[in-house]
Amino acid sequence: LYVDHPLGAGQSVPLDRDQAHYLFGVMRQGAGAPVLLFNGRDGEWLATVTEAGKRGGLLSCEEQTRPLQLPPDLWLLFAPIKKARTDFIVEKAAEMGAARIVPVQTEFTNAERIRRDRLQAHAVEAAEQCGGTFVPEVADLVPLSRLLADWPEDRRLMWCDEALVGGSAGLPDGAAGPWAILIGPEGGFSEVERSRLKALPQAVPVSLGPRILRADTAAVAALTLWQDQLGD
Ligand code: SAM
């Protein structure tokens, strides 16, 4: 169970109404039940329910069962699309071990704003689902131009471009990281964006195969390709 609270030996951890409903209502746990907790920072802890109510509860932390396991330092940058598909991208990126998820506004991106809190909640759920101890941070929507202007010198950018379809671009084997992956919007990248990306020495254009994939499919394919060739 994810809690936004410090975890440590003897620490009391309060539960809010939703967490109490899940644990005591849906999962049918009560006082004395053991529960595994994580907060994305302190690893996984075994706790015991000390108070179980309808509107909240209290747990007492006992011992650490796993240390914090950090994923590789990989960022996923993507242009938000329709709500459900954007949720899907965040969920899959968190499951596949991206350390940071950055929604980007490109010229042809339809979304003007995002619900960062909602996307962050999806990342938490995905971490819970795959038994992780770490939750990737979902950043605020940032314009691609600003992102590229401030691009860190040491971070390489796997720029997925459907315009390369039929081309032979691939990932350089074992190239030193850290890395970021960039997925464009449904309308693809504009010519201005392509020339900015071409001018960025850290950017490596990558093809995801001979077919044009929907952006959500492209995100999963790119994460898989990165894992296979560069992940640990
Ligand atoms: N509007 C574009 C078109 O019709 O040509 C398609 C954009 S595609 C639906 C969305 C994004 O997924 C692209 O910007 C790119 O980042 C990625 N993508 C999809 N297929 C790809 C491929 N075969 N190789 C590399 N990137 C791909």
Image (tube, rainbow, N blue to C red):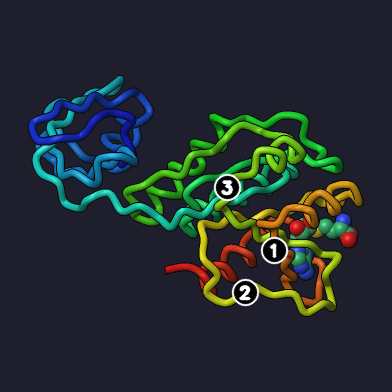
> In this figure, which residue is indicated by the disc labeled 2?
172
Q: Nearer the viewer, mark 2 or mark 3?
A: 2
Separation (CA) of disc 2 from disc 3: 26 Å
Rendered image: mark on residue 204: 1
Q: Is residue 75 visible?
A: yes
Q: Amino acid at mark 2?
A: Pro
Quarter residue 159 falls in: bottom right
Q: Amino acid at mark 1?
A: Val
Instruction: Mark 2 and ligand 1: say if the CB distance to the nearest ligand atom is below 8 Å.
Output: no
The reply to whether the C-beta atoms of the residues labelled 2 and 1 are less than 8 Å apart is yes
> In this figure, which residue is indicated by the disc labeled 3?
90
Label 3 environment density (alpha carbons within 10 Å; few <14, some 14–19, many ≥20)? many
Quarter that holds the C terminus:
bottom left
What residue is rendered at 14% in x and 46% in y?
Answer: 64
- Locate ligand 1 by image quadrant: bottom right
Label 3's element?
helix
Q: Amino acid at mark 3?
A: Val
Report the side of 49 relative to 187 (left or right).
left
Residue most extreme to the top: 55
What residue is rendered at 31% in x and 33% in y?
Answer: 3
